[in-house]
Amino acid sequence: MRDGDALSEVCHRLGPAIYRRCLKILRNPDEAADACQKVFLQLVRHRSRLPPEPEQLRWVYVVATRVCFAQLRDDAWETASGAELNHDAPSPADSFAEVADRQLALKALSCATEHERMVAWLVLVDGHSQEEAAELLSLSRKTVGKRIQLFLANARRAVFE
Amino acid sequence: MNAPRTAQCPSDLALEEHLLEANPATARHIAGCAHCQAWERSAAEASRAFAHQGPRWIAKAQARPSLVSRWAPLLPAAALAAAALFFFLQAPPESPRYATKGEALTVYVGGQGPPRAATDGERVRPGEALRFHVAPGEGAFVWIASVDSTGTVSRLAPAEGTTPLAVEGAGLLPGGAVLDATGGPERIWAVISKEPLSWSVVEQALRGSPVRDPAAVHIPGARTATVLLERSAP
């Protein structure tokens, strides 16, 4: 199989997972589409670093996560509002409790650094263990633990004070 | 309202892996978990959305040339420009000036390594580039020329035109020269005058002058400064 064909096969096989990942973090189809294309570009550029098939999903999952958080950061610079998750507007189907929870989460996220957010997202939102998050982000378990603690401490302060 | 995630729920990545390759344990969990069933439904919905647009995004990403290949045609020119800038824009080093008759001429030699100010009798090699700095001290006209061991005169700056360069105070002159493969001594001359001299006057005065004896050159109405270079054969 030619290099281009192999890459195309990877993109088509993992594309839905990449899009889902972007949509879950960005919660906006247009922005998820932008992020998804950025991930494909990364795949094209770094095709030589693509791991063997069993690890490819994990690899693109991390790339997509990083791309999405970078996009959130860049959006924050563009709007200079610091409220880069504002596009996560409640839909009419959301219940009052869901909206309240989300606003609380946004408040907590808004006072965290990008690194803390990513770790917090993987562990608290995606349900990864700290060990898994550490492995995905190539960090030590200790660093992940520290970042989670820092994130939670800042979040509590932001929410309750 | 979506059911909340439980401690038993597989991670997002594990659920994605299950979609790619069914995992019996994950399947059993999903069957009894409202949160993961909702995850599966939203995953299916996102997959349908991707099916509409995704192939176009993939084609677009694959069609887009890489950053390197987009700029590749300009890379050789950029490299040359960078090298030229490195040599020509680098501040002249503080160095002794070798001059005669009270006028300063500094010859800078650029090749491998940083540019250097040539000392009198400096060994230079083919391919090295020369630039000239003169300091007449007041407004003056300057010709830069060279004379080789046979007495042949070469005009170096200005390379074209009929009038010499006007220099106020001191300055690095525009243009320069690149040494060819000729070996032997070569004397660089700065001919400095209050009034512009024609090139023919300068050439006539320098032609046939002994390369190792600068005192032998006299140009009416002009002062001179000189540096001797020793050109080594390739």
Image (cartoon, coloured by chain):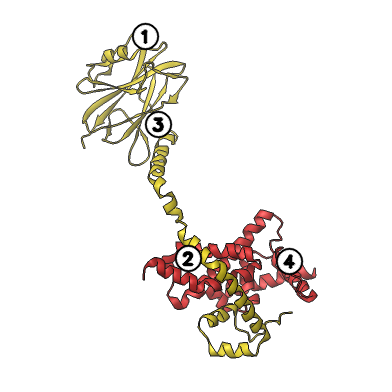
Chain colours: A red, B yellow
Q: Which residue lies furthest to the top in this view?
A: B220
Q: In this view, does B162 lie to the left or right of A76?
A: left
Discs 1, 2 touching: Cβ within 8 Å: no
- Checking the image for residue A110, the label placed there is none
Relative depth, front residue between A46 and B213: A46
The mark closer to the camera, 1 or 3, is 1
Q: Are marks 4 and 1 on the same chain?
A: no
* Residue A137, position as x, y percentages in the image: 54, 71
- Badge 4: chain ID: A
Identify the residue position indicated by label 4 in the image: A89
Q: Name the residue under label 2.
A: A43
Q: What residue type is labelled 1?
A: Gly
**Pointer 1 chain:** B
Badges 3 and 4, same chain:
no
Label 2 neighbour load within 10 Å: few <14, some 14-19, many 20+? many
Query: Which quadrant: the N terminus of chain B?
Result: bottom right
Figure check: B167 above or below A141 = above
